[in-house]
Structure formats: C-alpha cells, structure tokens
Amino acid sequence: MDRERASATHGLPRFALGPVAGLAAVLATVLTALSGRYGYHRDELYFLAAGDHLAWGYTDQPPLTPFAARVATEVFGESPAALRVPATLALVATLFVVALIARELGGDRRVQVLAAGLAGVGGQPLAVGHMLSTATFDLLAWLAICWLLLRLLRTGDGRWWVPTGLCVGAGLLNKYLVALLVLVLLAAVLPMGARRLPRGPWLFAGTAAALVVAAPALWWQAAHGWPQLTVAGGISADDGAENRILFVPQQLIYLSPLFVPVWVAGWLRLWRDPALRFARPFALAYPLLCLLVLALGGKGYYAVPLLIVLLAAGCAPALEQLRRAGASRLRAVGAAAAVAVTVVINAAVTLPVLPPSALDVPMALNKEQGEQLGWPELADAAARGWSGIPEGRRASAVLFTQNYGEAGALDRYGPALGLPRPHSGHMAYADWGPPPDTADGPVLLVRQQGADGIERYFTGCRPVARVDNGHGVRNEEQAAAVVLCSGTVLPWSRLWPSLRHYY
C-alpha cells in the first residue's frame, strides 16, 4: 500500500513554479498599482471598525477578515492600498492553488499556467483580489480544500485528512459558507468515491483539527444565540428572489462568458475520463451546490470556487484542441484574443481603471465599483450638519447612522473633522452599544435617500445637508440625507432593540 501511495504521489507532472510565480507577480503588481484608486468600500470601512473591536465573532461574520484588516493597518498604515495587501496576497495564493489543482488532474506545466492565468483574470477573482472581503479568503479556502480532497482521493493517503481539516477550520474562521462546500462534497463523494475515501484515525484527526481551529468562532456564535442564522435568513428573505433569478446568468459571467466552453469541457472531462475517476465527485458537487444555493436563496458567487475547479479541469482539453494537427494559427490567435478581451472587460468591471464619472456601465454588472466612492464627502456633509448644533449642546448630542458603511466612514474620517464616535443599529455596530441615556440632546442622523422611515424614532427632524460624491455616481449613498433631530422618542436603552437591524 505504501508503494502504491508513493507511486501515486510522485506520478504527477512537474509543478510550474516559475511560470505561475511570474503570473502571480504580474497580477500582484497590477492590483497594487490600482489599489489606491477610488477609496474604501463600505464593507472595508466596516472591517476597519470591527478590527478596532477584535472578538472571536461578530453578528454577521467570524473574526478572520476583521483581524486581517487590523493587521494590515498596523503593519502598512491607514489607507485603502494598505488595507488591500492581504487581498492581493490571498489572490496570489489562489493562483498557486489553482495550478496545483490542474496538476492534480494530470495537467502538465502549460496546463497549470493556463489554469492559473484564466482563474486570475476571471471577473470574480479579480473583484475579491482588489478589495478586502470575506469572499477574498473564502475563495482561497474553498479551492485549498478542493485541492487537498483531490489529493486525498487520488492517493488514498489518509494523512491528507489533517491539512484538509485545518483548511476547513480556517475557512470557518472566515465565513461559515464553507460548510456548504463540505456538505456537497460529502454528498458527492459518498455515492461516487466512497471506496477511495480513507477512513480510520486520520479521518478523526482531520475532523478534530477542523473543530479545534473553528471552536472559538463557533462558541461565540452559540453563546450569542447564533445571530449569523438571523442574518442569513434576513438576506434570503430580502434578496432571495432576485438571487434565484440571476443565478444562472451569473454562472456564465462570473469568470467570463468566453470561458464557458473551457469549464463545460472540464465538467465533461471529470465525468467521463476513466483516468480521473477519483475526481468524478467534483462533477456532481457543482450542480449539487447550485441547487443548494438556489434553495437557500444565496448569492451566485457562492458557486464560483467549484466553477474554477471545472475551469482547471478544462484547460487540458482546451490546449489539446489548439495542439491538434488540424488546428490553424487563426484558432490560436482567436483564443489569445478571447483572453485579451476577457482581461479588458473584467478589468473595467471589477478594477478601478475607469474615471469615476464613467462607472454607470460597469456598475450595471458590479455595483461594488461605485461603493468605493463618496465616503469622505459623506463625512464632510455630516460635519456640516454637526456644526449646526450649538456648542453647548454637543456634549449630549449623538451621531447616528442608518448602516455600517456610513458609521464606518464616520469612524474613519470623522475624528479629523471634529465629529464624535458614530452609533448605529446595523450589524455588529448594534453590539458595540447604544449611547448612554444621558445623551439626551440633539441627534444628527445620516441615512440613505428615501429611508426616512427611521425618523419615526426621533423628534423634530429636519434635513440639514445632502451627500454628493462629486462624480455623479449613483451609488447607495449618493444624495444621502443628513438630518438634525431634536431628540429621541424614548431613552436610548429602551429604543436600542427597535433600532437593531441585520440588512
């Protein structure tokens, strides 16, 4: 058995370390050069605030991404470019993992480079590599688990359960969605690859490793009544119908419409190729995941990691098509042109390469582009509203925001403008506490345009300023209102449960 395992382990093509490292270096250089354009995303401002309140969990997420935000700012300073260093490094690591997946499926050095390159210029990987987000590390964790499970199934060596378990645990420290991957992979492996699945003490060791790594975050959720489930339920109720309608089109565009033939070929290869019988469960896992996400009303990008596995599997037949004797130079030029078009389109949609005034078209596909603009201007508008409060009343006044993006912006830019710490009932901001009941003075409310329903909790409200990002970009905070209210309808401690919200 040991001889069989050694043969299986060493029977792979050489790893294309140099070429993949070169691709990664180019991509990292481009992302770093662009990372300072536009500004923080609303979620990044929230991660910065959460990093200032380090804990083993938060209402809507585990601790890893806020911790990464804290480390990045401590090491590299306070700027969008500094905060995004971990995102760039995570995408670089993702390229190496994709190449390893292609190698595990028998791909030679050229196949590995192609797989890493296509994944690296895919729309969703570029988007999460540009900005710090939970999806950034989720993509890396899912792909690492896929690679390790492929190796486990191919070699039959149970020792791979331990690193697999460690990756599952690390994924749970970042985002609980990794549980969906574990579920569908188990559902696919048990009927199709159970004979190749090693059991015994290494399986228990891997399971224990996952639980030990994830235990602090799981304990926090349990101790606080599993608020993540409330958040997930709210997202499904609020966006579930739209997510289901868009799911299939998103599968076609999240990497690139021009890459669809490659990942379809990869699915067919995993399903049909006798040499990849050990990997056949991944052909079943992708549609199972799609059905599960559709049932839950989740977002289409949840399935992207398994889509990338299919893409990596399809690179070998794609190259074979180009290498065939009958393949013309025109076909090769056409393939190169398709990749070039993909790079241009995906960069425009996901990276800050266009002038802000030209974002209307990219935002139709990726509204997150526009969410990187207007935060300093929002803080300026709040400062104008705060200046309307008499100095003698500011000690008992409160700065309150509708959502965590607004609160994060005021946390980041407000101190330099003389603003106090903001409060909000949104997500983890609600856990960081209401103002004291002694803060019974005026309330300066920052809310999105049209969200005037929140004013029912306050008295004597009148708009005193409007937010203008200066570029005409129609993001969620454009024309947001700064409203000055004379007070609250109840003391803050009694009002706070009504102000808490999850979406």
Image (cartoon, grey):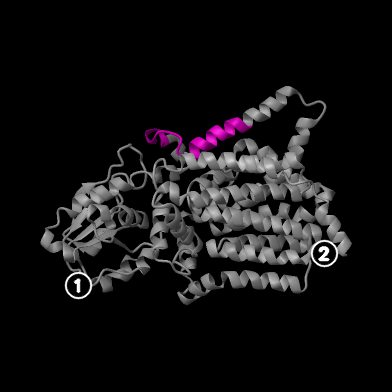
What residue is rendered at 56% in x and 51% in y? 90
Query: Percent position (x, y) of residue 352?
Result: 45, 38
Inspect the magenta stretch and tell me whether residue 330 lies in it: no
Range of the magenta residues? 339-360
Near-viewer residue (199 or 243): 199
Q: Rounded to the nearest whole Å, what is the CA distance between mark 2 and mark 1?
A: 67 Å
What residue is rendered at 48% in x and 58% in y? 68
Near-viewer residue (239 or 164): 164
Q: Quadrant of the C terminus?
A: bottom left
Query: Percent position (x, y) of residue 293?
Result: 58, 56
- Mark 1 Cα shell of 10 Å, populated few (<14), some (14-19), many (≥20): few
What residue is rendered at 80% in x and 59% in y? 155
Query: Percent position (x, y) of residue 201?
Result: 75, 74
Q: Quadrant of residue 198?
A: bottom right
Tell me if residue 79 comes above or below residue 331 in the rendering. Answer: below
Q: Amino acid at mark 2?
A: Arg
Tell me if residue 29 comes above or below residue 57 in the rendering. Answer: above
Name the residue furthest front: 75
- Give the numbered dot on residue 438: 1
Is residue 220 at all visible to an observer of this figure? yes
What residue is rendered at 61% in x and 50% in y? 94
Q: Quadrant of residue 394?
A: bottom left
Name the residue furthest bottom: 223
Q: Secondary structure at mark 1?
A: loop
Q: Secondary structure at mark 2?
A: helix
Is residue 115 at all visible to an observer of this figure? no
In this rendering, the label closer to the viewer, 2 or 1: 1
